Amino acid sequence: MSGKMCSSSVIQAQKLVDQLRVEASMERFKISLTAADLVQYCQEHRRSDPLLTGIAASSNPFKDKKTCVLL
Amino acid sequence: MCDQTFVAATFGPCDNCTTASPLMNIYIKNEAINYCSFCVEVMACQGLQKGESLANLKRECESLKKKLEEERGKLNDVELHQVAEKVEVVGALSIKTRRVLKGHGNKVLCMDWCKDKRRLVSSSQDGKVIVWDGFTLNKEHGMTMPTTWVMACAYAPSGCAVACGGLDNKCSVIPLSLDSNENLAAKKKTVAMHTNYISGCTFTNSDMQLLSSSGDGTCALWDVESGQLLQSFHGHTADVLSLDLAPSETGNTFVSGGCDKKANVWDMRSGQNIQSFECHESDINCVKYYPSGDAFASASDDATCRFFDLRADREVAVFQKDSIIFGASTVDFSLSGRLLFAGYNDYTMNVWDVLKGNRVSILFGHENRISRVRVSPDGTALCSASWDNTLRIWA
């Protein structure tokens, strides 16, 4: 047994190989497909995103409402 | 035979030979094994005798890594911003500070929104955890934890409790009562116990389970009622700094990022690490899922934020600029996922267009580094916590 070989490094290497095997067996999709889905999600939810499109001060509880003017 | 020196955290009877000795706590296929160092050597040699040598394993490792690179490379047929060319540009944003929450005596390290879209909880370096009403700036509850640097806090989905943890290595759940005279800190219940600081915590879809990430390199899923460990997640080789739960109702995955520059995606039921991304050049400070659950973003000390697509299993965008040299500490998406709000150590927040990859806006206001940024559950506002002792709500 070579003195340089540590038992824990064998176990670590074994774990690493097992992990990589799991990852390598994963099914992947092309970016053209997945990116299109991401873009579509953004577009679909664009209108319901208050920070993106901005909503009126009256419906946003954090924005200050215009002060009332007494006539 | 050389017996290597190791730090023994436990002493007791070995699982294999039953002699009492310092034990090496190792995990084989997610099972905890406590062997004395001699039995570990014997086990490793047996593994070797079956024909696998360390050199063989290392070679297989390298070839698998190369294969992964190749597979991922094959999918890179187009860039995200190219697919998004036809999408209209984001208009000028009118986001300004609307509220400044003052009350913490020291750096605010973490904050979380309540599902009722108005309350939020924040925790700070001096050990105080405060529950605020974001509309009125009223401090509804204030609790003092028996530790400094409360680095993680989370609101329960029901709004009836908060969880917090930090240097005490524990994550505690505190039920919030309406009676202001009650000493809430006394009702605190310790749920998570790690061997190093708690860097992040979040409730899962109910008040019953809590997910925690720790400086000890692991994440863990706990049952709140009994405090029992339901699942532990091993794989990071350094401190885990952040975690985020996948958004879907049925989703049972979460992503974690740490000082080993890796972002890992985990299956909560099996404890298995299903995907791993190593693209950053420094510690990953924060990870956050895209609203659809098919992607996530990360913020790192290398001054970039990156966007990873889970189905393509690769990084699809890098948000960086030569003028940005300070690390990014936190990220969050707007409701539609179009905008990415990132807080940096140069006291500013940059707003990035996720699809096109360019910066849309810079938000100034804080007087020290930003530790946490979170968009409210209905997307109307954004809250930022900072080392300048304040929180700001932007809308």
Image (cartoon, coloured by chain):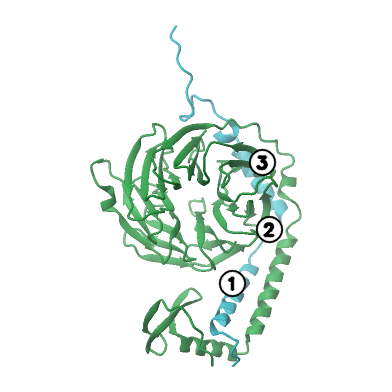
* Residue B210 location, quadrant: bottom left
Question: Where does residue B385 sit, x and y in percent of width and height?
Answer: 48, 43
The residue positioned 60% from the left and 63% from the top of the image is B276
Tell me the subunit letter for badge 2. Answer: A
Which mark is in front, 1 or 2? 1
Residue that carries the numbered disc 2 in the rendered image: A29
Callout 1: 10 Å neighbours few (<14), some, many (20+)? many
Cα–Cα span, label 1 and label 2: 20 Å
Is there a contact, CB below 8 Å, between mark 3 and mark 2? Answer: no
Q: In the rendering, what colour is chain A?
A: cyan
Label 2 element class? loop
| CA separation in Å, label 3 and label 2 | 28 Å
Q: Toward which corner of the image does residue B65 lie, by quadrant?
A: bottom right
- In the picture of the structure, the residue carrying the numbered disc 1 is A19
Q: Position of residue B5 (x, y in %)?
A: 49, 83
Tell me which amino acid carries mark 1: Gln
Q: Residues within 10 Å of mark 3 (few under 14, many from 20)?
A: some
Q: Which residue shows up at 42% across the image and 42% down it? A: B115
Q: Which residue is mark 3?
A: B359
Q: Label 3 lies in what chain? A: B
Q: Secondary structure at mark 3?
A: strand
Q: Which chain is green?
A: B
